[in-house]
Image (cartoon, helix red, strand yellow):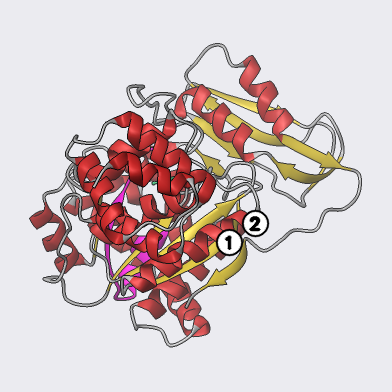
Amino acid sequence: MRMVDIIERKRDGETLTNDEIRFFIDGYTRGEIPDYQASSFAMATLFRGMNKEEIATLTDSMMHSGDVIDLSSIKGVKVDKHSTGGVGDKTSLALGPLVAACGAKVAKMSGRGLGHTGGTLDKMESIPGMRIELTEEEFINQVNSIGIAIMGQTKKLVPADKKLYALRDVTGTVESIPLIASSIMSKKLASGSDSILLDVKFGRGAFMKTFDSAKTLAETMVEIGDSLKRDTRAIITDMNQPLGLAVGNALEVKEAIDTLNGHGPKDFVELVRNAGSIMLQQAGIAKDMDEGFEMIDNAIENRSGLEKLKAMVKAQGGDESYISNPEQFPVAKNIIEIKAVDAGYIERIDSLEIGLSAMRLGAGRETMADKIDMSAGIVLSKKVGDKVEIGDILAYAHTNHDNFASEVADIRHAFSISHETVSTNPIIHAYIKK
Ligand code: URA
């Protein structure tokens, strides 16, 4: 078999055989197929697409390109959740402990943030002492004993994706549904959960810009999960404004703690309740949405979710007193009020602009080598639909930098204000399951 023939067949819109796809992934992972052929293959795939069977084979061969975690020694149904990335997305930190408090087993591998989106691992590291690198044995033991562990992906998980994603990033081939779907699902499947809930976001701050493209991606991933016998479901959620109020590492952890104390922002609570209810159904613990809502509400009210977060932090070496007393988190030396210069109703809050501004205030990285300032970020005071008068505070910028004028201007511009009243949409636009 020759790689050039496979590239030409995909270029001409033909359907590849399972053997051809496996030949490519195996050869590329071993370094036998060069980057120039892999990038040509990625471009041909971007233009020509793949059918369901090709995508399933691509995912399966990527998944088996490295370690596949065996979680069978964990008793009970293992549930996992993955977000395609957004701004202010601290969902795992509230949702994971809540579903674990209701009896599900949460064995989750997360990533770091890059560019305008944050990562769960960075947020967790704002808690002093928190270890995010666990051995497979520690990970499994922790889930068995307390019901939840969140760790970084091991280096040997899906090496094919590490190479291919880095290549796609610099060859204009990221935006291909078969390549995105197989990249995400190969990592989720290799990390061993029995069921997966995908939160596919759309809007300015998200990977997918429109509802329709998010829906196609979600349906493709649910199909892959189903063909590989995992209960995979998806929700499609709105990123046309940041999620909740806080954007930035320690600020978001504090908001997750507030939520577990029953004081979460409305849109974030709505997302957590819905995602939680679905995950409890996937785990076989709740029989329908209503029962799941009731369980999640109880776990907030009786603080068992908060206790679960504390237990996880303690088990991973973190200082759990930060969860009981979040005022210990470092606070930036400058907290700048950003005021409205127009009156009306908030129509949109550009998540991309907010995410990029938070990054420039110190909360994120432009390259993987950059260091994060855990205290930096943005806290919104207004959300879409809210009424504002001139001079009302729209948001606070938190930074240790001394020059912040351009970020302040960008944050103000991120708010679009209408003279008409603005209706608000539910955060969840669709729920997809087989
Ligand atoms: N996230 C991934 O992990 N892979 C992609 O291809 C895109 C987003």
> Is 86 on the left or on the right of 65, as rendered?
right
- Of all residues, the one furthest to the bottom in this rendering is 287
Q: Quadrant of residue 111?
A: top left
Disc 2 from disc 1: Cα separation: 6 Å
User: Looking at this rendering, what residue extends furthest in the left direction?
Assistant: 137
Determine the quadrant in which ligand 1 lies.
top left
Magenta stretch bounds: 94-114
Give the percent coordinates (x, y) of residue 403: 56, 11
Which one is nearer the viewer's eye here, 186 or 273? 186
Q: Which residue is mark 1?
A: 215
Q: Residue at x 47, y 37 (%)?
A: 173
Image-quadrant location for residue 391 = top right
Q: Which residue is mark 2?
A: 211
Label 1, ligand 1: CB separation under 8 Å: no
Is residue 130 visible to us here? no
Q: Residues within 10 Å of mark 1 (few under 14, many from 20)?
A: many
Q: Is residue 358 visible?
A: yes
User: Residue at coordinates 38% horizontally, 73% vertically from top-left?
Assistant: 226
